[in-house]
Image: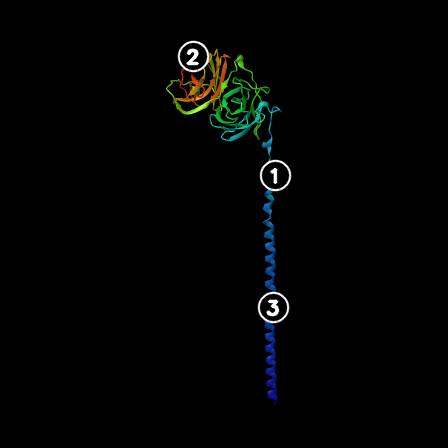
Amino acid sequence: MSTRSFSFLGSFALTAAMSAAALAQTTPTQQPTNTTAQPAQTQTTTTTQQTTTTQQPTQTQPTTQTTTTTQTTQAVQNADGSWTVVEFPAQKEVVVDFAPGADFSTAKGRAKVMRMADHTMVTLDLSGLPATTSNLNVYAVDPLGKATLLGPLTFKDGAVTHTLTTPLDKFMLVLSPEANLTTYGPQTAYAFRSTVPQGFAVVPLASTDREGGAPVGERVAATTTAGATSPYNVPMLNVPGMARGEDTQVKVNLTGALTGSRVNFNIEPRKDGPTMVTARFHELKESPAGKVFTLWAVSADNKFTKLGQVVNTGNRNEAEIKSETTLADFGLLITLEDETATSPHGDVVGTIMP
């Protein structure tokens, strides 16, 4: 009896001990739960820091404050807008509006100006003129106030569209019924004159003093006749051998229809490239009806560029042509031509010898 009781009690004790051991093993499994929760908190903190740093580049946006609209400033020399000479940029079309004179207050017009390598194209568009208007003359006025005749305009029903050229890059445009305008000033009568394009500064009126009282006559703009050739034999002047920035003077006695007339040439190769050519005519004879005396520059390969022309009606005996050319070397020729000639075909009245 005692032996069984011992066995029973031993079994009970063994069972109790095993239950306690099993209970001790299940309790530690709750500890990893607390450990795995901690990394989740660390990841959340790191994500918040990254979001903050991505917002910093937006601080560079104030660069738009560096835009300064200085181009809207227009430097107009005369408060009434009577002097509007500007320098036109190369290879960029500029639209120039016209201010009408008192007799053309209902008219409107503009010009599109495109400066090329060796000349400037001027395309005019005018409308609303009185039906009685037949024609006007277009002048380019340089910084010295000297007027160069670009050509006449013939109107139909009070409107016209026409393209002209000039060798100038600094000028204003003046339209006038006057056929022999040689200089321009604030008091000069006009039909239209150009305004200052927005963003451009006016080129101030330069000194008009002339050495030795040289005449100021009508000057006509150059037109380039690319590829035009003729049988005229014109010697080159050896322009590369001339001192740049200095005048070389040549005097020529004219022949044919201009026998007794003479021309004084000033040829100045500029340091920046183009060569200035100034021709001052003295003792001019009246040109035949519909004819003009035309000055040409001829290249070494016998291609001609029209530098200008003189229309003499007998009311004056002096005139001037002032132009420029980008030819490296050239000769000069004066012929009697029709007013609309774009290449030489007429009689020679002067050849400039080197």
Q: Position of residue 61 (x, y in %)?
A: 59, 43
Q: Position of residue 249 (x, y in %)?
A: 47, 15
First in sequence: mark 2 vs mark 1: 1
Residue at the outermost left position: 231
Disc 2 marks which residue?
257
Q: Which mark is in front, 2 or 1?
A: 2
In the displayed orientation, state which residue is furthest to the right: 79
Q: Amino acid at mark 2?
A: Ala
Distance from disc 3 to disc 2, alpha carbons, whole Å, reads: 125 Å
Residue type at tag 1: Gln
The residue lying at 59 percent from left, 55 percent from top is: 47
Please name the residue shown 61% across and 61% down the image: 38
Q: Residues within 10 Å of mark 2 (few under 14, many from 20)?
A: some
Give the camera-side residue of 14 and 76: 76
The residue pinned by badge 3 equals 30
Q: What element does badge 2 sit on?
A: helix
Disc 3 residue type?
Gln
Tell me which numbered mark, 3 or 2, is placed earlier along the sequence.
3
Name the residue beneath numbered marker 1. 65
User: In this view, which residue lies farthest toward the top?
Assistant: 260
Please identify the quarter of the rendering in which residue 130 is found. Answer: top right
Marks 1 and 3, Cα distance to the nearest angstrom?
A: 62 Å
Vertical position of residue 250 compared to residue 125: above or below: above
Tally of marks: 3
Relative to 20, residue 107 above or below: above
Q: Nearer the viewer, mark 3 or mark 2?
A: 2
Quadrant in which the C terminus appears: top left
327 with respect to 189 (left or right):
left
